[in-house]
Image (tube, grey):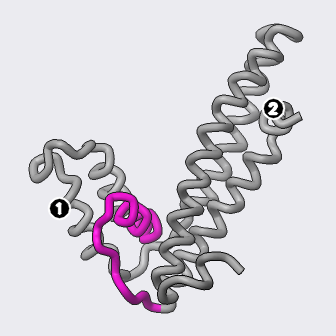
């Protein structure tokens, strides 16, 4: 039994799982980039620059396809606009000059694209109050986002650079 089953109500558990999955994804993505650079370096030493260019091109193609699959979060009426306003108050460069403006840009982009899960993640990351209850559609959206991030994590861990570094 995980800690998600023990603590908090259903909404809190879902937000916690979403947050943990996103954090895990970003850490693995950073590791992947480092491992890919090391892998490409080894290949370039062994085979030459031509192989390195081919490997980079193939990896970029795979990543772009996954990003497209991951970003297919449908825009629906959710609590995203009120949540966006809460996040915007904390992250807007005019309201809070000490906050990194990248957070505001991410929140704005997530709101425009209807990415409710990304807004929920940002609100948790920035310690902004999140909704206490979600509709069934919002729960489904968050569960899909969790599943998509888990698929991306799995993908990164199956790539040649990751397997090479782990060997």
4 horizontally vs 59: left or right: left
Q: Is 155 above or below relative to 165? A: below
Would you say residue 13 sits in the magenta stretch? Answer: no
Tell me if mark 1 has few (under 14), some (14-19) or many (20+) residues whose alpha carbon lies within 10 angstroms of its own: some
Report x, y in % for residue 145: 57, 68
Would you say residue 119 sits in the magenta stretch? Answer: yes
Residue 81: which disc? none
Q: Quadrant of the C terminus?
A: top right
Secondary structure category for the residue under label 1: helix
Report x, y in % for residue 155: 75, 51
Report x, y in % for residue 48: 82, 8
Kindly identify the residue that appears in the image at 66 percent across and 69 percent down: 147
| Image quadrant where residue 53 sits | top right
Secondary structure category for the residue under label 2: helix
145 horizontally vs 56: left or right: left
Stretch of the chain drawn in magenta? 113-135
Tell me if mark 2 has few (under 14), some (14-19) or many (20+) residues whose alpha carbon lies within 10 angstroms of its own: few
Q: Is 100 above or below relative to 118? A: above
Nearest to the eye among marks 2 and 1: give it.
Answer: 2
| Image quadrant where residue 132 sits | bottom left
Kindly identify the residue that appears in the image at 39 percent across and 89 percent down: 133
Q: Quadrant of the N terminus?
A: bottom right
Query: Mark 2 = which residue?
Result: 165
95 horizontally vs 7: left or right: left
Query: Mark 1 = which residue?
Result: 89
Q: Earlier in the sequence, mark 2 or mark 1?
A: 1
Q: How many numbered marks, from 0 up?
A: 2
Report x, y in % for residue 102: 32, 44
Kindly identify the residue that appears in the image at 59 percent across and 38 percent down: 30
**Is mark 2 in CB contact (under 8 Å) with mark 1?**
no
Kindly identify the residue that appears in the image at 20 percent across and 58 percent down: 90
Between the C-alphas of marks 2 and 1, the distance is: 42 Å
């Amino acid at each position: 039994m995980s800690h998600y089953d023990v603590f908090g109500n259903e909404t809190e558990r879902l937000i916690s799982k979403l947050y943990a999955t996103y954090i895990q994804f970003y850490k693995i993505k950073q590791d992947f980039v480092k491992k890919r650079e090391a892998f490409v370096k080894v290949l370039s030493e062994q085979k030459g620059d031509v192989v390195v260019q081919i490997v980079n091109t193939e990896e970029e193609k795979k990543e772009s396809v996954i990003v497209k699959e991951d970003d297919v979060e449908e825009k629906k009426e959710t609590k995203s606009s009120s949540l966006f306003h809460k996040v915007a108050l904390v992250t807007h460069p005019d309201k809070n000059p000490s906050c990194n403006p990248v957070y505001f840009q991410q929140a704005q982009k997530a709101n425009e694209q209807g990415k409710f899960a990304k807004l929920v993640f940002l609100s948790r990351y920035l310690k902004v109050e999140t909704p206490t209850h979600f509709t069934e559609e919002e729960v489904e959206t968050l569960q899909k986002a969790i599943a998509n991030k888990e698929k991306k994590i799995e993908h990164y861990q199956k790539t040649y650079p990751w397997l090479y570094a782990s060997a």
